[in-house]
């Protein structure tokens, strides 16, 4: 997958209402619907999702209206198998595709709850609904991709002599998006979907779902897995602090039920106050139980407030922070992100103005300076880099920690390295394990926390015999910091005590190119971050408080002997160094 394959989707409704906006009671406001769609087109979105509910406006008609008032915006129409016969559905959507100039795709929504299904006369149990969807999608795909009359005899549908005469626009491949997190959903979606849609979970859980879909695709005989889409509710502010203030106001509004008619409509799909039937909502609530904040800025109280109903986890922060979070998902294999706001129209405008340009700019930068994403995602353990010219690498000396908590953690890291081949998934798993270890409040030996008055120091806590990974205690005294440098490997950092400030830089495409800052983050006691990856690892770290900072650093190599690049940020000049255990950074 290339970085220029990434798509950004929005979602439109037919009236100005949301969980935080009461609306005026109208179900369809044509002028608002068109303004909403045009805001997405003007903002640079690739497609918009048009949702489905048993009593909602019919999606293909909404799509037809939007198509008549936009020029390039893709139309992703949610569709529930079993409500109409697939022979009719195949013609409905190819007809719409012809009139829209090839802009239609389907989002297959097999069902949410038994109650919602029965509103439209569907009394099949959960797994049978997916078995019926399997037949349904076989029929659609054949109607769109082949010509001539055909018969079909299955467990749910039967016909003879069906001869579809309306094909997709200019013979193109009409795409199928598919959602669901149950075992039955994975099997059917992995077999038929062009894009598999997930709700926003933490990176680790998302990577696990991607792996499940990939495994099911292989089992279905596919050469490659479907593309992956993940959905979020970004809450932006001019600064991170302003975004968090806004997020808490939104949560207060959701819990007071200001959304009125919208919440009543949503409650038909995802009833509040009852345990959800669908696996996706169950997963969101399980994530919320683990904690309110995950990874860079994924926030779960909004999902918990609506009972895990639908796309309801938020990304909270400045445009720069949320863009970085979206890119984190792209790096673990996500191909499409769907974003929608709580102030739907204005948020779509803000996303197009403030957020999408940052994401697109960084995607273009990564495309120009990195291998394709498939190469990045397929490797976790890379060959250890060779030293820079004129350097010799010191021998690797194995170290075993005598801190019980860290010894157990080292065993876990070794196992994770053996089990996980994707670098992003690996570092996410190690990050979560390190956070749990720090939460125990373990003590470090005094000789592993002693600052040096002249420079920062790194003490080895554990070094694998083969140099596959190392765990260090890194100590900065007040005012100390590292040079701007790369690691040539992945790294995860947790703060044992104090405050660490990291300034990131875009990795230059060549030597002697001045570096461009890409943001600054602050990490305090107990917080953990993936500090570097093999292909995006240029930063500077310094003490950020009025006392020394002690960090637990985990790297995919023996960091005390690994040759690394140091950069002059003003000129881009590069020279090589090794940290040298317990001796600071030295040439």
Image (spheres, rainbow, N blue to C red):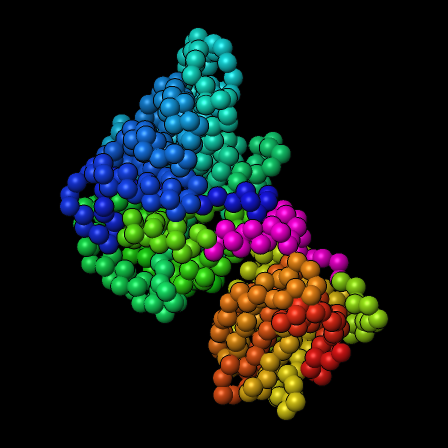
Give coordinates of residue 465: x percent, y percent: 76, 68
Look at the picture and state if 439 lies above or below 545.
Answer: above
- Nearest the camera: 364 or 284? 364
Which residue is drawn at the image coordinates 24% and 41% (left, top)?
32
Q: Tell me which secondary structure the magenta stretch mostly adopts.
A: helix
| Quadrant housing residue 537 | bottom right
Give coordinates of residue 294: x percent, y percent: 45, 62
Give coordinates of residue 302: x percent, y percent: 32, 57
- Specify whether residue 443 is painted magenta: no
Which residue is drawn at the image coordinates 29% and 52% (left, top)?
346
- Nearest the camera: 62 or 377? 62
| Residue 492 seen anywhere in this rendered image of the structure | no
Which residue is drawn at the image coordinates 38% and 41% (left, top)?
41
| Residue 355 seen anywhere in this rendered image of the structure | yes
Image quarter of the N terminus: top right
Give coordinates of residue 207: x percent, y percent: 53, 51
| Extent of the magenta region | 358-384
| Quadrant housing residue 475 | bottom right
Look at the picture and state if 210 lies above or below 97.
Answer: below
Image quarter of the C terminus: bottom right
């Amino acid at each position: 997958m290339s970085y220029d394959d990434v798509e950004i989707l929005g979602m439109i409704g037919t009236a100005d209402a949301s969980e935080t906006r009461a609306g005026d009671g109208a179900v369809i406001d044509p002028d608002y619907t068109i303004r909403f769609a045009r805001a997405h087109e003007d903002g640079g979105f690739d497609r918009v999702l048009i949702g489905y509910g048993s009593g909602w406006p019919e999606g293909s008609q909404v799509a037809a209206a939007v198509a008549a008032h936009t020029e390039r915006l893709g139309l992703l129409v949610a569709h529930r198998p079993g409500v109409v016969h697939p022979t009719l559905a195949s013609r409905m959507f190819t007809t719409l595709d012809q009139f829209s100039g090839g802009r239609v795709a389907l989002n297959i929504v097999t069902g949410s709850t038994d109650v919602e299904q029965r509103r439209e006369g569907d009394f099949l149990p959960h797994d049978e609904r997916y078995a019926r969807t399997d037949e349904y999608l076989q029929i659609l795909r054949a109607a769109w991709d082949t010509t001539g009359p055909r018969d079909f005899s299955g467990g749910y549908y039967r016909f003879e002599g069906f001869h579809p005469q309306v094909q997709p626009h200019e013979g193109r491949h009409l795409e199928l998006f598919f959602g669901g997190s149950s075992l039955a959903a994975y099997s059917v979606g992995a077999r038929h979907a062009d894009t598999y849609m997930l709700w926003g979970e933490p990176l680790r859980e998302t990577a696990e779902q991607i792996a499940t879909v990939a495994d099911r695709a292989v089992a279905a005989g596919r050469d490659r897995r479907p593309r992956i889409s993940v959905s979020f509710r970004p809450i932006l502010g001019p600064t991170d602090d302003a975004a968090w203030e806004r997020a808490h106001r939104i949560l207060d509004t959701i819990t007071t039920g200001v959304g009125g008619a919208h919440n009543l409509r949503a409650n038909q799909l995802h009833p509040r106050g009852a345990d959800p039937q669908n696996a996706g909502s169950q997963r969101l609530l399980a994530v919320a139980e683990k904690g309110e904040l995950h990874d860079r800025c994924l926030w779960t109280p909004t999902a918990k407030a609506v009972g895990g109903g639908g796309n309801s986890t938020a990304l909270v922060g400045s445009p720069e922070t949320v863009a970085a979070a979206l890119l984190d998902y792209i790096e673990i294999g996500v191909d499409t992100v769907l974003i929608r706001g709580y102030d739907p129209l204005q948020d779509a405008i803000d996303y197009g103005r403030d957020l999408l340009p940052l994401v697109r700019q960084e995607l273009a930068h990564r495309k120009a300076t990195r291998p394709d994403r498939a190469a990045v995602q397929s490797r976790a353990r890379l060959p250890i880099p060779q030293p820079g010219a004129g350097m010799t690498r010191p021998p690797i000396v194995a170290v075993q920690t005598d801190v019980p908590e860290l010894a157990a953690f080292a065993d876990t890291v070794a196992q994770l390295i053996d089990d996980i081949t994707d670098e992003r998934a690996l570092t996410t798993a190690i990050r979560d394990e390190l956070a749990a270890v720090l939460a125990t409040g373990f003590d470090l030996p005094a000789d592993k926390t002693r600052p040096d008055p002249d420079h920062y120091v790194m003490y080895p806590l554990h070094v694998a015999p083969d140099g596959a990974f190392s765990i260090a205690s890194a100590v900065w005294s007040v005012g100390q910091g590292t040079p701007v440098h790369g690691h040539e490997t992945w790294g995860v950092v947790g703060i044992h005590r104090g405050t660490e400030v990291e300034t990131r830089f875009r990795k230059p495409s060549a030597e002697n190119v001045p570096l461009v800052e890409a943001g600054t983050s602050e990490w305090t006691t107990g917080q953990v971050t993936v500090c570097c990856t093999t292909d995006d690892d240029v930063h500077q770290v310094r003490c950020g408080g009025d006392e020394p900072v002690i960090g637990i650093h985990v790297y995919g190599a023996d960091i005390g002997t690994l040759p690394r690049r140091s950069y002059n940020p003003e000129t881009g000049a590069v020279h090589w160094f090794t940290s040298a255990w317990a001796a600071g950074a030295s040439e």
